[in-house]
Image (cartoon, grey):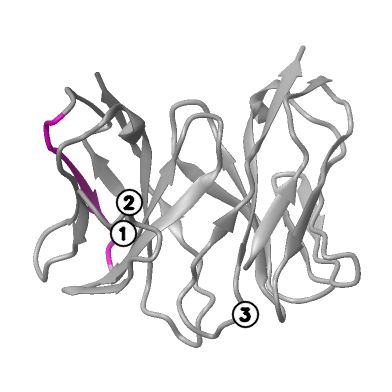
Amino acid sequence: GDSVTQMEGPVTLSEEAFLTINCTYTATGYPSLFWYVQYPGEGLQLLLKATKADDKGSNKGFEATYRKETTSFHLEKGSVQVSDSAVYFCALSPDSGGYQKVTFGIGTKLQVIP
Amino acid sequence: NAGVMQNPRHLVRRRGQEARLRCSPMKGHSHVYWYRQLPEEGLKFMVYLQKENIIDESGMPKERFSAEFPKEGPSILRIQQVVRGDSAAYFCASSPELAGGRETQYFGPGTRLLVL
């Protein structure tokens, strides 16, 4: 079945450091790929998405590129801020043409210190 | 346009009681999904509903759990005779009518259930 593997946290960075959170997936065909962010005590917010190979999703300085050859969708940001502290989930929905049964990774907690 | 609404935000129940969680999808959305997040884990799909229909309940435990999405009113996730292992955050998501699939799901703030 479909699965998403992301690096375990927590990840602790100083403000303005470069961020990479690795994500790889297993799925047939061309799933859609997502990054969601969860701030403390809140629900998930869609951060960015990509629906086909080589697409780059971007939002709020975050980027991720859909790499079919390596089945990866790594999240990057050039300069993190304290306000980026949250849990980040990589996710996919299958290439079924039907409804989305989203599969999530375990989540990576990011802590940015001033 | 209000987002996905869930209530209550926090719910405390004793073992054996019933828990009833409500979800109002975004305006114009006719598809509802329920997910469970156990402590220190990612979200796991439970059930997918359209108005008055359960489409996929493959992720929902066979006993004690049920879900509905009536023609009028919110979607309800009901847990009967709760046990401590049911303690988790339950998230609802909604999406609009699919047009070829791939519509993004929008999540509510979740209901955090604690079973004593």
Q: Quadrant of the C terminus of chain B?
A: top left
Q: Chain of mark 2?
A: B
Q: Which mark is residue B26?
A: 1
Which is in the foreground here, disc 3 or disc 2?
3
The x and y percentages for residue A11 are: 77, 26
Q: Quadrant of the N terminus of chain B?
A: bottom left
Few, some or many C-alpha atoms within 10 Å of disc 1 (few <14, some 14-19, many ≥20)? many
Secondary structure beneath dot 1 equals loop
The verdict on a common chain for dots 1 and 3 is no
Height in image: B70 above or below B107?
below
Q: Earlier in the sequence, mark 2 or mark 1?
A: 2
Mark 2 and mark 1: Cα distance apart in space: 5 Å
Height in image: B62 above or below A27?
above
What's drawn in magenta, residue-wise? B16-27
Q: Is residue A23 visible?
A: yes
The x and y percentages for residue B31 are: 32, 69
Whether tag 1 and tag 3 are in contact, CB under 8 A, the answer is: no
Q: Chain of mark 1?
A: B
Residue marked by disc 3: A95
Residue B23 counted in the magenta span: yes
Q: Chain of mark 3?
A: A
Along the horizontal axis of the image, is A82 left or right of B44? right
Height in image: A101 above or below B60?
below
Amino acid marked by disc 1? Met
Q: Which mark is residue B4?
A: 2
Along the horizontal axis of the image, is B53 left or right of A25? left
Whether tag 2 and tag 1 are in contact, CB under 8 A, the answer is: yes
The x and y percentages for residue B104 are: 51, 66
Residue in front for this viewpoint, B39 or A63: B39
At a point 38% along the width and 65% down the height, the residue shown is B58
Amino acid marked by disc 2? Val
Residue in front for this viewpoint, B27 or A21: A21
